[in-house]
Amino acid sequence: MTRLRAALAGISLIFFIMPMSATAASTGVTTFELENGMQVVVVEDHRAPVVQHMVWYRAGSADETSGASGVAHFLEHLLFKATDTLAEGELSATVSANGGRDNAFTSFDYTAYFQRVAADRLEIMMRMEADRMRNIRLTETNIETERKVIIEERNQRTENNPRALLSEQMRAVQYHNHRYGVPIIGWMHEMETLDMEDVLGFYETYYHPNNAILVVSGDVEPNEVRRLATRYYGVIPENTDLPKRQRSAEPPQTAERRVLLRDVRVAQPYVSRSYLATERNSGDQHMAAALTLLADLLGGGTTSYLTEKLQFDSQKAVYTGAFYGGVSLDSTTFSLVMVPSADVSLQDAEDAMDATLAQFLIDGVDEDRLARIKYQLRASDIYGRDNVDGIANRYGRALASGLTIEDVQSWPEVLQAVTADEIMAAARKVLVRNASVTGWLMRNEEVTQ
């Protein structure tokens, strides 16, 4: 342990003494904006001749119009079709032929496209990605074929998975008035009606450079990235009618809500609980940091509070966990899960979980455990700098969710500064039964008590 602590201190010192400049922080991050409003972030890491090229659009499923759920994800699939200059499938084939890999993903607040290739192939990636930003060419055959693909994806990932169905229903109950209550992939009955007009409407509204963030990480020079970005992305006109990201607010929750899902396919019943919680806000991340540490303290591993009390002491559970996803444009959730032991009913499991949470609010934070978690987070942050994929994702996801470069860079220190009292204050504010959704996943033959 002493050697590890010394090694980490040495690494921290290296980062601390790196020279600063007007364009690059000590972490090797450079950011600038093209004339058309496209934000560009460059994260340098010259240890391997590899680059990650990502384009993030500030448009996800929560930006869809009512009745067209799933269109953001549908468009993500369709962007791999033909453009003015690329044949269908040519982009991915080119990436593969150059020894790289590519993919895309959709979330509530963003859609992202990426390629990971050798550093000297960056220009090819930019040329192709910029092309499909504005020049996608779809046919009715594309729409029909890919609609079947996303419907089958929903069948496989959601309809055939009781755990996914419970999660989806709990989120729908959690958010009464906000689009976060609508699944990213979409509701089946709306997915089945998505058409060319829906897709092109979303594309024409959001797929513009002033609604996009370009993140390039790896073996790159900022000036070269600027030159290429200006050449390929800089010539694309901005959308002067880009709508503001205005979402309907969630009303205060004053009564606890429950979801009971019975399914013959359930192999392991369990209890899940979610609470509305604040997200990481730009310039004010302290509450989110406290909730991040609270999740680790309650259910972050074998030494966590829930694990110790429910798995080891009372042996009422075979698994416990706590989760908080702070990177979100709007209010997020803090969640708990408890898988009961074989002879423990779901009601007994829920009662035990509630009793344990109540006892935690009395016992407070174990300072030694908190110190270990902070130490682990510090080490994870340092080691994470070796991962060009992870770094690009960290910046892109944050920027697309309303945070800034400064927020990303200050986050590790914000976490380290959180006190036990602040964690307990966050716990008392968030862990309120009247502001929760409790879900039971059970077999058909099980009954409630």
Image (cartoon, grey):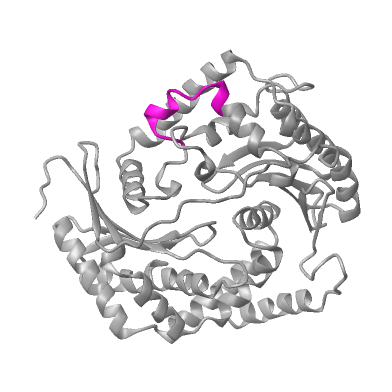
**Up-down relation of residue 192 to residue 403 (above or below):** above
Q: Is 407 on the left or on the right of 227, as rendered?
A: left
- Whether residue 203 is visible here, answered yes or no, is yes
Range of magenta residues: 185-198
**Up-down relation of residue 17 to residue 388 (above or below):** below
- Hey, which residue is sitting farthest top in the picture? 141
Identified at 84% across, 42% down, the residue is 234
Is 373 or 136 nearer to us in this picture? 136
Residue 199 falls in which quadrant of the image?
top right
Q: Which percent across, then down, holds residue 365?
A: 39, 83
Is 297 or 64 nearer to us in this picture? 64
Queried whether the magenta region covers residue 189, the answer comes back as yes
Queried whether the magenta region covers residue 167, the answer comes back as no
Residue 200 falls in which quadrant of the image?
top right
Q: Quadrant of the N terminus?
A: bottom right
- Hey, which residue is sitting farthest front in the picture? 241
Is 233 or 48 nearer to us in this picture? 233
